[in-house]
Amino acid sequence: MKNTSNLKARLMIVTLFAIGMLVALMLPGQKSSADPKKGALQVQSQAAQGQAAPGNSQPANFLVLVTDPDTGTAVTDLVQADFKIINHFAVTGQTCGFSNNIVGFANVGTGAYQIRVGLVVPGCTWVAGDYLAQVMVARGSEAGQAAVTLSVE
């Protein structure tokens, strides 16, 4: 009789534990403080040569889309100071780049930002090739980045 009571008690404990685990799994998830997305912005970018062409110094175009990864909503309140565009590596024959030289900026109001970059050194001209760039966006403690190729032909 004691063995039966002991077995029933153990079975009851295991059952309660299993029910507790099921309830915990069904509750809406809470993000931990170690969540890698916390404070992140989702950044996508495309580049086009715009008026830039080999031999001239006209600006090139970048379209940057910024989204809140938690809600999926567009981030619409950024200003030019929240953006940096860095030119990485040199194209053969290139004597200057466009790092941090935003010469035109438009907030479209839909999470899209139209950015024009110019060459840093006056009198410098574009050369044909693929320019690798890093687009960085930071707003307070939130940040994100994307890699993009600008082809000048």
Image: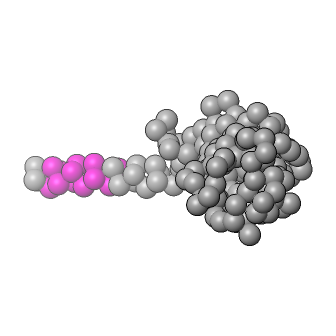
Q: Is residue 39 left or right of residue 63?
A: left
* 103 or 19: nearer the viewer: 103
What residue is drawn where x is 57% and y is 40%? 38
Percent from the top left, x then y, of residue 135? 66, 48
Residue at screen point 63% across, 40% down: 143
130 lies left or right of 11: right
One can see residue 74 in this view? no
Residue at figure coordinates x 81%, y 57% from the top left: 56
As displayed, is residue 101 above or below residue 10?
A: above
- Given residues 49 and 65, the one toward you in this image is 49
- Magenta segment includes 62: no
Q: Which residues are magenta?
A: 4-16
> Can residue 22 be seen here?
yes
Residue placed furthest toward the bottom: 153
* Image location of residue 97, percent across then percent down: 67, 47
- Is 7 included in the stretch rendered in magenta? yes
Q: Quadrant of residue 41?
A: top right
Horizontally, residue 122 falls left or right of residue 136, namely: right
Closer-to-camera residue (17/67):
67
The secondary structure making up most of the magenta span is: helix
Total residue callouts: 0
Q: Residue at x 17, y 54 (%)?
A: 7
Res. 18 image quadrant? bottom left
In the picture, the quarter occupied by the C terminus is bottom right
